[in-house]
Amino acid sequence: QVQLVESGGGLVQAGGSLRLSCAASGILFSSYTMGWYRQAPGNERELVATITNRGSTDYADSVKGRFTISRDNAKNTVYLQMNSLKPEDTADYYCNAYRILGGRDYWGKGTLVTVSS
């Protein structure tokens, strides 16, 4: 059974930092591209950052220079370090695991990040 469990969300003031974690189980973690997505109320889910199995990263323009995605294959965990948070970063943040081979695509249940002004 595949599980992606996010943690680390919470309430923070603008300018503050949070680190999200996503622990994966039931998959060969090192073979997956891992990503963070977010969805604010009334908005569609949007890409925040991805990291491939080889460590290549990609970011939404809105978070470049502020957020950093990383992974620890030994711990089957992907992280999202979020600095200089803004109220517009408020959203539910979801972890995603994707692999082209076999068309595998899995999602976590999300963790809420609230940034107060």
Image (cartoon, rainbow, N blue to C red):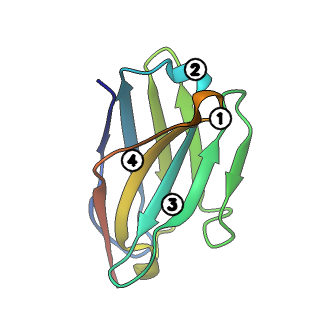
Question: Distance from label 4 to label 2 (Cα)?
Answer: 19 Å
Of badges 1 and 2, nearer the viewer stands: 1
Q: Quadrant of residue 99?
A: top right
Question: Distance from label 2 to label 3 (Cα)?
Answer: 26 Å
Circle 3 — which element?
loop
Return the x and y of residue 16 as percentages of the image width and height.
41, 65
Q: Along the polypeptide, which appears first: circle 4 or circle 2?
A: 4
Where does label 2 land, which residue? 30
Tell me which amino acid carries mark 3. Answer: Asn
> Mark 2, residues whose alpha carbon is within 10 Å: few (<14), some, or many (≥20)?
some
Left or right of residue 115, residue 97 in this image:
right
For residue 20, the mark is: 4
Q: Along the polypeptide, which appears first: circle 2 or circle 3?
A: 2
Tell me what residue is drawn at x 28 percent, y 50 percent.
109
Tell me which amino acid carries mark 2. Answer: Ser
Q: Along the polypeptide, which appears first: circle 1 or circle 3?
A: 3
CB atoms of marks 1 and 3 within 8 Å: no
> Mark 1, residues whose alpha carbon is within 10 Å: few (<14), some, or many (≥20)?
few
Where does label 1 land, which residue? 100
Question: Distance from label 1 to label 2 (Cα)?
Answer: 13 Å
Left or right of residue 111, residue 22 in this image:
right
Return the x and y of residue 61 as percentages of the image width and height.
69, 70
Q: Along the polypeptide, which appears first: circle 1 or circle 2?
A: 2
Of badges 2 and 3, nearer the viewer stands: 2
Q: Quadrant of residue 34?
A: top right
- Give above or below for 75 relative to 69: above
Tell me which amino acid carries mark 4. Answer: Leu
Return the x and y of residue 93 as percentages of the image width and height.
38, 59
Which of the two residues, 99 or 10, is positioned nearer the viewer here? 99
Of badges 1 and 3, nearer the viewer stands: 1
Tell me what residue is drawn at x 65 percent, y 35 percent.
100
